Image: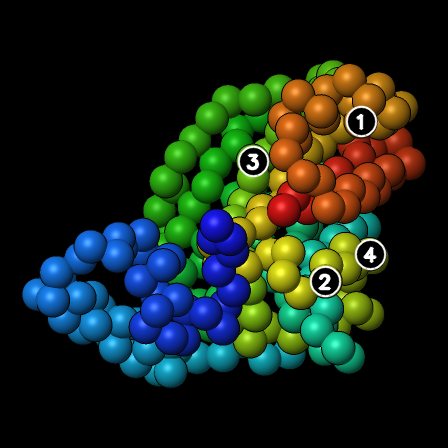
Amino acid sequence: MNDFISEEDLLTFEGFLKYQGVPPTATAEELAAFRGFFEESIKARESSPRVGLTKVQRVPGEQKYAVAIRDGTDLWLTMWVRYSRKGEIFIMYPRGNRDWDAHASYHCDGTFHQKSYGTVGMSFKRQPLKRFRESEPLGMYGGHGKGSGAVCDPQAFDRVVLVEPGILEPKDGSVGVDIVEPGYEATWERDVAPRFYFGDVYKREIFPQTGRLSVAITVQR
């Protein structure tokens, strides 16, 4: 059974039911309730502001790496990594609702947290960046797609990881981000990455920096 669900599938009631995991044995009353949820989701989608061309600015001393879905001649930004001048790492998501401000960040003292609506959701203590050894995973991120309407401008980024349609969708596919000690990239990819990325890796790109930590981005089906 193919349980792949595309962004277009979510615009249909059948695809919505599949995404929600509603069994074929659902009663008429249950289906009526889910029909209401489906109609609410469509209204919310239609009323949500579209991002459009993302206003990401180039800043001297920073590096930015995008993950974009390529659909014909269009490039849709689904997330990006900002490597600040201080050496801190930020994982950003394009969203029309600016109050959401969902992102993850790894700070100089080793604090790694995920934040949205101005509130820290999860916080961990990792290696301080000035005494960093080997590698640290910064998580796997799902919930991708073109729904935000964020247009990727390749000129705004140092590199763009291009992903073909059907890989990163609302339910399927994920993007992993790791930071890696300079000179450790080959060892990490050979010995460490296979233990964490044991599924179907679609693409991996590692971006080394002179005298700075490398950023590894892994797209997994």
Rendering quarter of residue 159: bottom right
C-alpha distance separating marks 2 and 4: 16 Å
The label on residue 189 is 1
**Discs 2/3, front:** 2
Q: Is residue 38 left or right of residue 147?
A: left
Using the image as rendered, state which of residue 85 and residue 111 is in the foreground. 111
Residue at 56% from the left image edge and 39% from the top image edge? 140
Residue type at mark 4: give it: Arg
Rendering quarter of residue 184: top right
Residue that carries the numbered disc 4 in the rendered image: 159
The label on residue 139 is 3
Q: Secondary structure at mark 3?
A: strand
Residue type at mark 3: give it: Gly
Q: Earlier in the sequence, mark 3 or mark 4?
A: 3
The label on residue 164 is 2
Dot 3 and dot 4 residues touching (CB under 8 Å): no
State the image coordinates of residue 167 (x, y, percent, origin top left): 64, 56
**Discs 1/3, front:** 1
Q: Secondary structure at mark 1?
A: helix
Dot 2 and dot 3 residues touching (CB under 8 Å): no
Using the image as rendered, state which of residue 64 and residue 58 is in the foreground. 64
Residue at 71% from the left image edge and 24% from the top image edge? 194
C-alpha distance separating marks 2 and 1: 23 Å
Dot 2 and dot 1 residues touching (CB under 8 Å): no
Q: Is residue 53 left or right of residue 206?
A: left
The answer to whether residue 86 shows anywhere in this view is no
